[in-house]
């Protein structure tokens, strides 16, 4: 009878202790591990168990983790399934930096499954917040390596969830998506222009466009310098090779010229992101020039003044920077969600039960402060015909008995019957028919918010 090899024996065969394993051997190893497993969840579990036994072979561990996630996401039926796949994806995000964005997105997908498995509305909202943050991290990780297309996908997923679960960051995400969309389009444009230049290397127009897109939109002078030749604009020929160098390598005159070129020419654009990047470069060159100009005179004072002006401009445009925290846009502060009213933090105590009005429906009546008496039409009196021995018949008015002359009736929910007059438990001032909220004792939005102490903002805890 054929016996299945134990995992320990397999580990010895494939040589996990520091020995390189080929792709075919890895596939065979994985096939043996999951042999006999009846479900994707079981396969994922077996692979995770094998990871713990492969210390010292990073490449093999990554392969096992990848397969564990691949099978795991197909069988997310329980919270324990989600926890296992979450752990595997988290390990991959830390050990596989090139695909960090992808593995963070996988973690977010596991959280989306957890939302479906959760029953409580509050739990769903908390899990959604974690998933949104993972998508944001994924977008940031992709942006760090210049993969704007992947970054855009992650931020779009974050935005869609933030809208569904009414997270405050949804508006900031929309702004970030506009920025990333422009960068992703520019990245696609450079790819097309590069292909075009392969077939038409003498096309000066395409070459100029490519250099400008790399230099201004993508803020990448290193790649821009690769396409500099005698056909492009003379200023590009003079300055782009210098801009491709590290700022610390440049001399005083080069820093001055580059700073002026970036600020006075390249930053003159209506696109906020391009302007921000060009001013940021201009400031870096100006700061370097100031350190090289080791004098204390009117020139150095002018250079410092110019730096302060650029700092002020950059502060206004900082929210367009795709690398700053999308939750606070580098301000370090977030709006307090606990005291938010119509999208703005009020700094006041907010009560979910009464929507911060301090009022709630009176429990003693059935939907109305008072119901007009049908017998008297709300007049409190009725017209009757009276017979008199002396006067004969004549018409007069009497107090309405059903409403005791009040003209109104109300329904007492406790006794399930109509009673005369208006409800004694209801407020008589505006809004009529209400009672003080039992959760906030009628304070509504008058007291300071206990979360932010009335400051309306909180320190950002999401900054990368």
Image (tube, grey):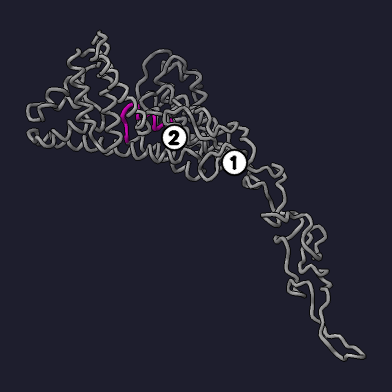
| Disc 1 residue crowd, few under 14, some 14–19, many 20+, Cα 10 Å | some
Helix, strand or loop at mark 1: loop
User: Disc 2 versus disc 1: distance between alpha carbons?
Assistant: 20 Å
Say above or below: 115 vs 308: below
For image coordinates 81% across by 66% down, the residue present is: 420
Q: 19 or 407, which lies in front?
A: 407
Camera-side mark, 2 or 1: 2
In the image, taking residue 425 as reference, residue 155 lies left or right, namely left
Q: 425 or 192, which lies in front?
A: 425
Pinpoint residue 281: horizontal percent, then vertical percent: 26, 24
Asked if one can make out residue 14 in the rendered structure from this viewpoint, the answer is yes
Q: Which residue is the site of mark 2?
A: 135
Q: Which residue is the site of mark 1?
A: 118
Pinpoint residue 381: horizontal percent, then vertical percent: 79, 74
Q: Which mark is residue 140?
A: none
Q: Give the prevailing secondary structure in the magenta stretch.
A: helix
The image quarter containing residue 408 is bottom right
| Disc 2 residue crowd, few under 14, some 14–19, many 20+, Cα 10 Å | many
For image coordinates 32% across by 36% down, the residue present is: 149
The image quarter containing residue 259 is top left
Q: 25 or 148, which lies in front?
A: 148
Q: Is residue 264 magenta?
A: no
The image quarter containing residue 28 is top left
Give the extent of the magenta segment: 135-148
Q: Quadrant of the C terminus?
A: top left
Say above or below: 81 vs 56: below
Pinpoint residue 144: horizontal percent, then vertical percent: 35, 26
Pinpoint residue 224: horizontal percent, then vertical percent: 19, 27
């Amino acid at each position: 009878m054929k016996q299945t090899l134990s995992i320990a024996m397999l580990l010895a065969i494939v040589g996990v202790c520091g020995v390189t394993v080929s792709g075919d051997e890895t596939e065979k190893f994985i096939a043996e591990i999951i042999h006999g497993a009846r479900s994707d969840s079981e396969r994922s579990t077996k692979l995770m168990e094998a990871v713990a036994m492969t210390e010292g072979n990073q490449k093999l561990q990554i392969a096992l983790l990848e397969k564990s996630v691949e099978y795991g996401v197909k069988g997310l039926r329980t919270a324990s399934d989600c926890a296992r796949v979450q752990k595997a994806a988290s390990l991959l995000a830390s050990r596989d930096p090139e695909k960090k964005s992808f593995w963070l997105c996988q973690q977010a997908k596991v959280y989306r499954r957890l939302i479906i498995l959760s029953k409580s509305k509050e739990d769903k909202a908390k899990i959604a917040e974690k998933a949104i943050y993972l998508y944001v991290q994924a977008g940031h990780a992709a942006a760090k390596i210049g993969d704007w297309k992947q970054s855009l996908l992650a931020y779009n997923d974050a935005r869609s969830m933030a809208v569904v679960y009414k997270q405050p960051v949804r508006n900031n995400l929309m702004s970030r998506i506009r920025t990333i969309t422009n960068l992703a389009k520019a990245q696609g444009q450079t790819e097309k222009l590069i292909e075009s230049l392969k077939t038409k290397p003498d096309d000066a127009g395409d070459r100029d466009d490519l250099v400008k897109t790399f230099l201004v939109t993508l803020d990448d002078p290193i790649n821009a310098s690769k396409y500099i030749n005698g056909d492009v604009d003379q200023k590009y020929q003079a300055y782009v090779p210098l801009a491709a160098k590290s700022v610390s390598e440049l001399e005083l005159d080069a820093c001055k010229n580059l700073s002026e070129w970036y600020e006075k020419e390249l930053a003159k654009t209506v696109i906020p992101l391009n302007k921000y990047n060009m001013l940021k470069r201009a400031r870096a060159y100006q700061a370097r020039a100031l350190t090289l100009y080791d004098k204390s005179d009117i020139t150095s004072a002018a250079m410092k003044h110019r730096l302060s002006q650029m700092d002020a401009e950059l502060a206004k445009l900082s929210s367009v920077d795709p690398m700053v925290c999308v939750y606070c846009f580098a301000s370090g502060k977030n709006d307090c969600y606990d005291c938010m009213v119509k999208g703005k933090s009020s700094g006041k105590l907010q009560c979910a039960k009464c929507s911060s009005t301090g009022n709630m429906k009176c429990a003693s009546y059935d939907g109305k402060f008072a119901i007009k008496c049908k017998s008297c039409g709300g007049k409190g009196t009725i017209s009757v015909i009276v017979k008199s021995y002396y006067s004969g018949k004549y018409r007069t008015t009497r107090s309405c008995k059903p409403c005791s002359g009040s003209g109104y009736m109300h329904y007492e929910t406790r006794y399930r019957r109509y009673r005369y007059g208006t409800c004694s438990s209801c407020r008589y001032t505006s809004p009529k028919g209400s009672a003080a909220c039992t959760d906030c004792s009628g304070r509504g939005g008058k007291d300071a918010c206990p979360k932010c102490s009335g400051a309306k903002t909180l320190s950002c805890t999401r900054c990368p």
